[in-house]
Amino acid sequence: MKEFEFLDIISNQLSDNSYIGDDCAFLDDLGIFVTHDTLVENIHFTMYTTSAYMLGRKSVAVNLSDLAAALCEPEYITISLSLPSDTDNKFVSEFYRGVNDIVSEYRVKVVGGDITGAEKITVSVCAIGKKNIPCISSRKNAKKGDVILVTGQHGNSSAGLYALQNFLQADDYLINSHLNPKPRLYESKILSQNIDSNIAVIDSSDGLIDALYRISAASKHSIEIDINKVPVSTELIEFSKINNIDYKNFVMWGAEDYELVITVPEETYINLDKNLFTQIGKVQNKDFSPVVSVQDGKKSFKINREIFEKNAFNHFGNKI
């Protein structure tokens, strides 16, 4: 995957690459977290599957999701909007109506940005959060014996997108899961109130297996999960059955659920609300070759780098 190659090049070119690796960078001297995401038309969204209003909401939501994974309190965002010359005023008005609704909901302030011309609609958002607990979340913090937890259900968003792309009937729940994701800030706050050590947290923006593999790679520990323990919706199962699709493909490889994937000591999990956090596996031995082992009933299979790169979302290849 070019993404990994480019990240390696960037890391090698920087004289100080200590902030590279997680979706959020923690600036210790300022006590803040910073994250930055870009959505590009026909790579991350199309205007025939969404609206300007929903795009505005989602552009903010994906960054708030990164702050949720950092276990911090969202404070500010800036938005850079690049638009084709034929974009009308209504698009800008609806986009920022969506932005305003979601920042009002989560009490975040828009404090700046930029507007430029471009061949395709491109939205680039920077989000800033305040550190309010002593512990730090990072992919590299997974330790042997930690339990692996997830929030919410998985596979809904990619099933909703599949339905939109292929003009298939689907329950509104699946469609809305794709168009209007909910950053897990409440669950993040609950988690932060129950930990007393650094833990690993990442969101599933690029898929559940993607998140697990990246934790495995950063922490240098193998991971084992039971795919049948991952929460799924009846809507997803029904949609998959009608369209003759294995719903587990949506669950494992489908992106943009924006759920949290977490590793914590077992004693921490005991105190967490099981309605909010579901255990799906465990962190295993130290392993310098990242691997995710997936148990599926009597079957099991391993996901190494080759399998991961073949199936994971590729920002330089995938188009929606």
Image: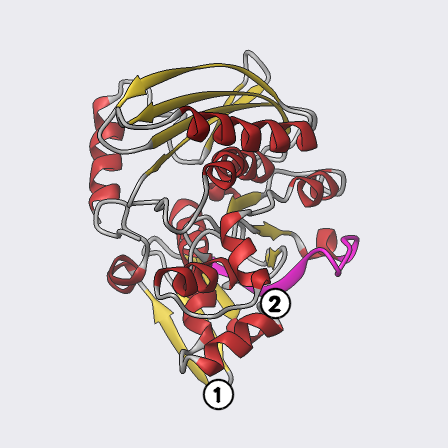
Residue 279 located within the stretch drawn in magenta: yes
Q: Is residue 307 above or below residue 25?
A: below
From the top left corner, tell me how far across and down residue 14 is, in percent: 26, 21
Label 1: few (<14), some (14–19) or many (≥20) C-alpha neighbours in 10 Å: few
Residue 72 in sight in this render:
no
Q: Are marks 1 and 2 in contact (CB under 8 Å)?
A: no
Residue underneath mark 1: 298
Residue situated in front as seen by the camera: 116 or 134: 116
Residue 42 in sight in this render:
yes
Circle nearer the viewer, 1 or 2: 2
Residue at image position (48%, 31%) is 95
Task: Kindly state the secondary structure of the residue where label 2 is placed.
Answer: loop
Residue at image position (69%, 33%) is 105
Q: Which residues are magenta?
A: 270-285
Residue at image position (51%, 72%) is 227
What label does residue 101 carry, if any?
Answer: none
From the top left corner, tell me how far across and down residue 302 is, in percent: 36, 70
Label 2: few (<14), some (14–19) or many (≥20) C-alpha neighbours in 10 Å: some
Quadrant position of residue 83: top left
From the top left corner, tell me how far across and down residue 289 is, in percent: 32, 56
Residue 144 located within the stretch drawn in magenta: no
What label does residue 231 carry, if any?
Answer: 2
Query: Type of residue at label 1?
Result: Lys
Q: Earlier in the sequence, mark 1 or mark 2?
A: 2
Residue situated in front as seen by the camera: 137 or 1: 1
